[in-house]
């Protein structure tokens, strides 16, 4: 870990400078040598970094939306090459390249935070060893060494020996209890963040490698943080716990306000929107009107959540318009229009049709009063048809003849 921290030492001075500036503010309120002053300085550093990473987070959301939009195509590739895993992977990579989608985009915020994380680790390691680093020198170094959070020094770790902890004027029990609680909270927040993404904001009707990747991350990341957490100083645990809580709250806001189509979160959002429209008789908010406009534009390609929303509007006596607003209509007429739109959905093709890329035309239907052609198999009863020449009356075919019902000969061949 020390070797990795040295690789990011180029950012140590800026990180230490930001901590010192926040410490001046909080030190004037809580006292310069208190754990509150130094702890809140680290929390403020996290908030500042995450605010700077908001554009990257927006890019991550857009990339995730692209992955969701590609899921039907990805499912088609899986079905077409289900017996050829190598060809399936090649087609998936080709699809990613053509659409400019990165399946690893969910890791971008973590990768962007890595330099700041290791720089902070380097600073706290210097505090633990009494070494001046960056802008933390002289009196500031001694003040940071005396700062405790719930009895645990900022630079102490779970694996530290009793002698090292005593040198920081603390007890080994306090350090291990505080660090253990923070490691559990850090891992739990990471797990809950990934779980709410998988359970609420993913279209579970489509199984793709992207979903498998997210499911693996849901279990792998908490384990990684738990294992690595015993080697993190208390100050780094404060940093990582804060960034996990920020990510969880940020993701919760996105799920509630801009859910993925076809997910449980979208169903909950549209039900809330339906109640709002029923209560006020209009779609309130530009963002909500944009969502309704997109649903109307999909037409028969709407998912189950969106069809339920349109049907709910119809039962309430409203009809969604192309501009995202609603108009008051007769409930019976609105329900009939919604049902007609649902019936216009394209018929599901067979596997052979999807592979060939052809669409089977609909079979023509005949009315009961329409006369049938003379070549139709069902044009007359089986018993009324003339038996083939030489065929016994008992209905058993001669040797060499094909079993089963015989097609009548064309008039030109008689």
Image (cartoon, rainbow, N blue to C red):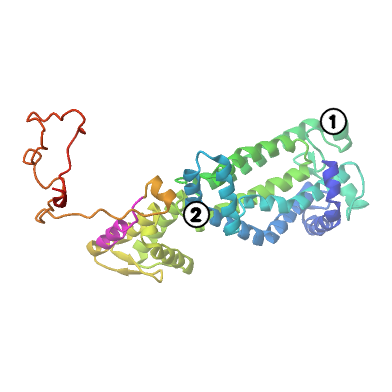
Q: Nearer the viewer, residue 5 or 143?
A: 5
The residue sitting at 90% across, 41% down in the picture is: 129
Q: Is residue 304 visible?
A: yes
Mark 1 secondary-structure assignment? loop
- Tell whether 277 sits left or right of 374: right
> Where is mark 2, residue-wise?
260
Nearest-to-viewer mark from 1 and 2:
2
Mark 2 secondary-structure assignment? loop
- Tell whether 300 sits left or right of 398: right
Residue 83 numbered tag: none
Q: Of callouts 1 and 2, which one flags the residue occurring earlier in the amino acid sequence?
A: 1
CA distance for labels 1 and 2:
49 Å
- x and y percent of residue 90 in the render? 59, 47
- Tell whether 226 sits left or right of 334: right
> Where is mark 1, residue-wise?
161
- x and y percent of residue 218 in the render? 60, 41
Quadrant of the snapshot with the N terminus:
top right
> Start and end of the magenta stretch?
335-348
Q: Is residue 341 magenta?
A: yes
């Amino acid at each position: 870990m020390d070797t990795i921290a040295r690789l990011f030492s180029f950012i140590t001075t800026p990180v230490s400078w930001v901590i010192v500036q926040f410490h001046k503010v909080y030190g004037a309120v809580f006292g310069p040598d208190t754990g509150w002053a130094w702890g809140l300085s680290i929390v403020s550093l996290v908030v500042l970094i995450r605010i700077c990473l908001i554009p990257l987070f927006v890019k991550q959301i857009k990339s995730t939306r692209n992955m969701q939009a590609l899921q039907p195509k990805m499912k088609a590739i899986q079905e077409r090459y289900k017996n050829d895993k190598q060809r399936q992977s090649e087609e998936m990579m080709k699809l990613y390249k053509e659409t400019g989608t990165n399946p690893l985009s969910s890791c971008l915020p973590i990768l962007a935070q890595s330099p700041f994380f290791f720089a902070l680790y380097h600073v706290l390691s210097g505090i633990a060893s009494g070494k001046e680093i960056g802008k933390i020198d002289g009196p500031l170094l001694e003040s940071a060494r005396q700062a405790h959070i719930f009895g645990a020094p900022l630079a102490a770790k779970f694996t530290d020996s009793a002698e090292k902890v005593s040198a920081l004027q603390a007890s080994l029990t306090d350090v291990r209890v505080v660090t253990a609680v923070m490691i559990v909270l850090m891992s739990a927040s990471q797990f809950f963040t990934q779980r709410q993404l998988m359970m609420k904001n993913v279209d579970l009707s489509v199984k793709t490698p992207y979903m498998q990747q997210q499911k693996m991350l849901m279990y792998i990341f908490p384990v990684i943080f738990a294992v690595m957490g015993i080697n993190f100083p208390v100050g780094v645990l404060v940093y990582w716990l804060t960034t996990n809580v920020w990510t969880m709250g940020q993701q919760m806001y996105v799920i509630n306000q801009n859910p993925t189509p076809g997910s449980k979160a979208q169903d909950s959002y549209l039900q809330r929107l339906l109640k709002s429209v029923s209560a006020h008789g209009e779609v309130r908010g530009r963002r909500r009107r944009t969502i309704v406009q997109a649903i109307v534009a999909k037409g028969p390609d709407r998912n189950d959540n969106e069809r339920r929303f349109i049907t709910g509007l119809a039962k309430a006596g409203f009809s969604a318009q192309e501009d995202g607003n609603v108009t008051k209509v007769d409930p019976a007429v609105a329900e009939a229009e919604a049902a007609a739109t649902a019936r216009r959905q394209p018929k599901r093709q067979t596997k052979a049709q999807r592979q060939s890329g052809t669409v089977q035309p609909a079979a023509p239907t005949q009315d009961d009063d329409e006369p049938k052609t003379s070549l139709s198999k069902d044009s007359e009863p089986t018993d009324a048809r003339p038996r083939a020449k030489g065929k016994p009356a008992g209905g058993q075919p001669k040797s060499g003849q094909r079993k089963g019902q015989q097609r009548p000969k064309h008039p030109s061949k008689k």
